[in-house]
Image (cartoon, grey):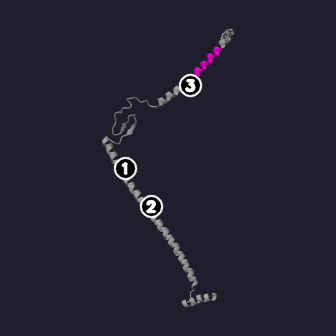
Amino acid sequence: MNSLSYSLLEVPSSIVQTATDEFDTILQEIESCSLNMLMSSAERRASMFSSRPVFNKTDCQPMKFENQRRICYSAHGIGISKKYGSIDELRRTISRQEIEAVEVDKEIEKLECHKKELEDKVREKSVELEKLCERKYLVNAVMEANKENTSIIMPGFNAVERIDKLTGNLTKNL
């Protein structure tokens, strides 16, 4: 340690003074920069809070109605359109709306039942349609078979001649 303290003593004071001056200027720059940053962030925070309304205990209490039929003020001072004159009217309106909601629910249930019935009818009719299409196919097949049979039996021959012709053809083949 003696060598370090001895070496500092030998250093000229102008060099030491220059280093401390530079160090002081650097510290001042850092302080001013951090002070500016702190001030700007404080201003931002202050502007955020100043843009919002500040409520105290008196703001949370309901205000007196100026015109009870028109405007009513809530706890935060927001104007609300006033339709109902009293709490009893409001309760009657709520009960009426609840009754209407129950009626709407009943009507919805009826419509759902009717929808299910219609879906069942559609299923039945589609099965019936498939059966009719199958029947039409079979009738067309029978008609084709009848046409083939009538083309074999030529018009103008009587039954005996037809039998002779058929048996004659059979005997010739034997």
Residue range (magenta): 19-35
Residue 105 coordinates in the image, percent (x, y): 38, 52
- Evaluate whether residue 86 shows in this view: no
Residue drawn at x 63%, y 14% as measured from the top left: 20
> Disc 3 marks which amino acid?
Met
Q: Amino acid at mark 2?
A: Glu
Gap in Å between the C-alphas at discs 1 and 2? Answer: 27 Å
Q: Earlier in the sequence, mark 1 or mark 2?
A: 1
- Residue with the mark numbered 3: 37
Task: Please indicate, yes or no, whether residue 43 appears anywhere in the rendered image.
Answer: yes
- The residue singled out by tag 1 in the image is 101
Q: Residue under circle 2? A: 119
**Quadrant containing the N terminus in the rendered view:** top right
- Does 119 sit above or below residue 47? below
**Is 169 in front, or is 37?**
169
Name the element at disc 2: helix
Q: Position of residue 126 (x, y in %)?
A: 48, 65
Q: Residue at position x 56%, y 25% from top?
A: 37
| Residue at image location 50% in from the left, 72% down from the top | 135
Circles 3 and 1: CB atoms closer than 8 Å: no
Q: Residue at x 35, y 48 (%)?
A: 98
Membership of 108 in magenta stretch: no
Q: Are marks 3 and 2 in contact (CB under 8 Å)?
A: no
Q: Which element type, helix, strand or loop, lies under badge 3? A: helix
N-term-proximal mark, 3 vs 2:
3
Q: Is residue 158 above or below residue 85?
A: below
Is the residue marked by circle 2 packed among few (<14), some (14-19), or many (20+) residues within 10 Å? few
Pointer 3 or 1: first along the chain? 3
